Image (tube, grey):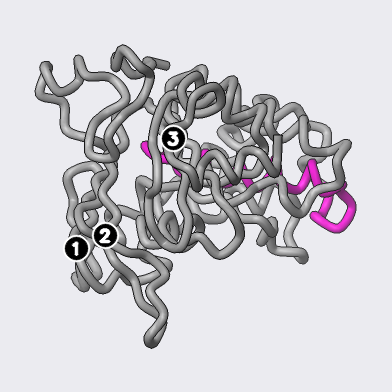
Amino acid sequence: MNKPTDTDGSADPSVFADASQLANGDAPMVELVGVSKFFGDFAALTNINLKVARQEVLVVIGPSGSGKSTMIRCVNRLETHDVGRIVVDGIELSDDVRNIQAIRRETGMVFQQFNLYPHLTVLDNITLSPRLVRGQTRAAAEAKAMELLERVQIPEQAHKRPGQLSGGQQQRVAIARSLAMEPKLMLFDEPTSALDPEMINEVLEVMTDLAREGMTMVVVTHEMNFARQVADRVVFMASGEVVEVGTPEHFFTNPSEPRTQAFLSQIL
């Protein structure tokens, strides 16, 4: 993971975490330009400008209702943005179904709730999409699924159904299911918020391993230790706006915006 090169640790929302990527001409994995989203008269997002570099871990924090989840849901078109542009791996999100499908094929998403099929085994939950979407044979899909279950440290759960697993185990299955599609980008929407405290670390460990392996990740979370230790950049959002962006060092030791300071004083 590459940290920003700004001398004070801060970063403008429009720049990469690693300035060398700009010099090398690398395109961002994700780019949001002037993105706004409305629910009726309510502005859920207002003029969001962000770039996520390849292999960057971007952690998004902020109070409830700040637009964090709405923003990442817009990235894979679970929500439709009303103004601005969103480009993922060079493909612009539009009403063209082909573009939406292309982006979703390369984007994994893990939600607060596990969203596993309760009537299917863990193995079947993981292999369903690779077989239906990517056309993998059952044998190939199951071999890959077992590799992923080893990776998230629950291979012994392969033939159980979700209801037989703990919350932490179910979330690890959800991560394995997303990884089975071999995504270039992983989105996490508060993946530990529905877990009991003793189960949180086992999920964060899997996410930390993914970051170390170079997965591009956008993570909405309230886990500040994860943000400190794993993030390349931290984004603070409030009232549908990006208020401040910086390295973890800048963010947790010398935030510049009063709203950021007030938020951190309440949770740290």
| Secondary structure predominantly adopted by residues drawn in magenta | helix
In the rendered structure, the answer to whether residue 40 lies left or right of residue 21 reads right
Tag on residue 47?
A: 2
User: 15 or 211: nearer the eye?
Assistant: 15
Question: Which mark is nearer the camera, 3 or 2?
Answer: 2
Earlier residue among tags 1 and 3: 3
Earlier residue among tags 3 and 2: 2
Question: Which mark is nearer the camera, 1 or 2?
Answer: 2
Secondary structure under the numbered disc 2 in the rendered image: strand
For disc 2, the neighbor class at 10 Å (few under 14, some 14 to 19, many from 20) is some
Callout 3, which amino acid? Leu
In the rendered structure, the answer to whether residue 101 lies left or right of residue 136 reads left
Between the residue at mark 1 and the residue at mark 3, the CA separation in whole angstroms equals 20 Å
Secondary structure under the numbered disc 3 in the rendered image: strand
Between the residue at mark 1 and the residue at mark 2, the CA separation in whole angstroms equals 8 Å
Which portion, as a residue range, is magenta? Answer: 160-185
What residue appears at the point 18 percent right and 56 percent down from the top-left corner?
92
Above or below, 129 against 225 in this view is below
What residue would you read off at disc 3?
58
Query: Quick check: is 200 in the magenta stretch?
Result: no
CB contact under 8 Å: marks 1 and 2: yes
Q: Position of residue 268 (x, y in %)?
A: 70, 34
Tag on residue 84?
A: 1
Callout 2, which amino acid? Asn
